[in-house]
Image (spheres, rainbow, N blue to C red):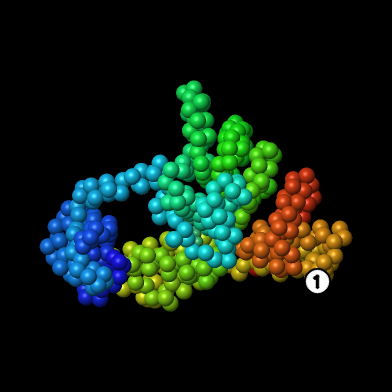
Amino acid sequence: MWDRACDILYADMKEVTFNTWIKVPLTPLGIKEDVFYLSAATEMYQQIVTSRYIGNISEALTQVAERDVRAEILSPAQAKDYHEGAVESQRIIDNANLNPKYTFETFVVGNNNRLAHAASLAVAELPGGDFNPLFIYGGAGLGKTHLMHAIGHYALEENPNLRVRYVTTEVFTNEMIAAIQSRTMAEFRNKYRNIDILLVDDIQFLAGRDGTQEEFFHTFNALHSAGRQVVVTSDKSPKEIQKMDERLISRLEWGMVADIAKPDEETRFEILRRKTVSGGIRIEESVLHKIAQKVSSNIRELEGCLTRLIAYSNLTGKVIDDQLAEEALRDIFQSNEPRHVTCDDVITAVAGYYNVKVEEIKGPRRNREITVPRQIAMFLCREMVDVSLEVIGHRFNRDHSTVMHACQKVVSEKEQSPSLASLIRDLTKQLQERT
Ligand code: ADP
Ligand code: MG
């Protein structure tokens, strides 16, 4: 409602006025009967906006609601009181340690994250069901933490009595060490074993920490055997995490393992579009297309571009158009990202090395002369090409689990065989130089 009111206000005001007095300092709190509450950033804003713009704001809101609505601007202190009403649900979210922005509603589903999203939703709907534990993995800034919080929010909305707790691996580790030092392990265990949904972020940081792994292993077992849900994220698949207890790895694979890949251009555009709509920001689609085209590495960077554009526009008082985008994002737009390696590049290189035909690698034969290069090619695609397991599988006429298997096999064999490791290094180098 506030977004639409902003559209009306924006049309009636100079851009700089709108930004200075409406968009930047005001945050909508909610509507009670016919009063729409907004909070101002400071008392000064409250006074000035109330004296100058309360009429315009009320009118815009009335127009949107198609009934009489009166705006009321609250100071930060008043806003706090206003929130006390919503305190109970806020308290639950705080206890669970969830970020209110990371929900399913704000998560854009694309080909890169479809499986991880579906699995997360299934877990949120039925914690402790088939997908227990849920293991989500993928590169930095691709939405793992977001999905994890979304599970927590959704489950709490369905059942506010659930005990949900989000924790980073780092915090888990630090709390455990502190508990050992202060001899309060019993409390620590109690805290982590009386939970309905435990969300542990970035589990790869347990690598090499035997004591914490051991403790987490017991926590996991206690929760899992009691039918409680465990969700973990990592930057690698379970098998790819080095220096991790085998027993723990096998547990982590018990339930559902889902990967998130880098988003394609269409998904990147959609993420940008959704962010501008929810933020009430006006940006031409052509600008968004351009950003989506240029920034492909991760979503955090995409968001960074938007933030920069908005700041630039606020500072200069200019509208966000192609020209402003060129100025604000010059360094990003001009960087010549190297051409990316494709699956076919990889397959061709591996086929050349082993002196087999590309069609054979993609074909059905399963004799060792072909399966070894095929598995290595799959592994290299996984390492070097920004696409999901499913897409890789497709290039090989196989499914994603075959690719996952191949990658795991190569990873473990590489450990045992220095010659294989060096071969993979050579092929990687060769492919990088080619692009
Ligand atoms: P990770 O934990 O994988 O490093 P995050 O979950 O922290 O990544 O995501 C980085 C940022 O990108 C967050 O602000 C998040 O809201 C946003 N983001 C990631 N994926 C999506 C998506 N599919 N839709 C909308 N926003 C996303
Ligand atoms: Mg994260």
- Residue at 16% from the left image edge and 65% from the top image edge: 54
* Relative height, residue 29 to residue 202 (above, below): below
- Residue at 27% from the left image edge and 56% from the top image edge: 29
Question: What x and y, as percent, mark residue 289?
Answer: 46, 74
Residue 144 visible? The answer is no
Check disc 1 and give the amino acid type: Glu
Residue lying at the far top in this picture: please name it: 183
Question: What x and y, as percent, mark residue 199?
Answer: 52, 45
Residue position marked by numbered label 1 in the rendering: 359
Residue 353 visible? The answer is yes
Relative depth, front residue between 221 and 130: 130
Q: How crowded is mark 1: few (under 14 residues within 10 Å), some or many (20 or more)?
A: few
* Relative height, residue 96 to residue 273 (above, below): above
On screen, residue 166 versus residue 279, left or right, reads: right
Total count of labels: 1
Question: What x and y, as percent, mark residue 215?
Answer: 58, 32
SS category of the residue bearing label 1: helix
Relative depth, front residue between 347 and 32: 32
The quarter in which the C terminus is drawn is bottom right
Quadrant assignment, res 348: bottom right
Task: Check mark 1 vs ligand 1: CB closer than 8 Å? yes or no.
Answer: no
The quarter in which the N terminus is drawn is bottom left
- Residue at 39% from the left image edge and 72% from the top image edge: 325
On screen, residue 221 versus residue 97, left or right, reads: right
Residue lying at the far left in this picture: please name it: 51
- Residue at 21% from the left image edge and 62% from the top image edge: 34
Question: What x and y, as percent, mark residue 130?
Answer: 62, 50
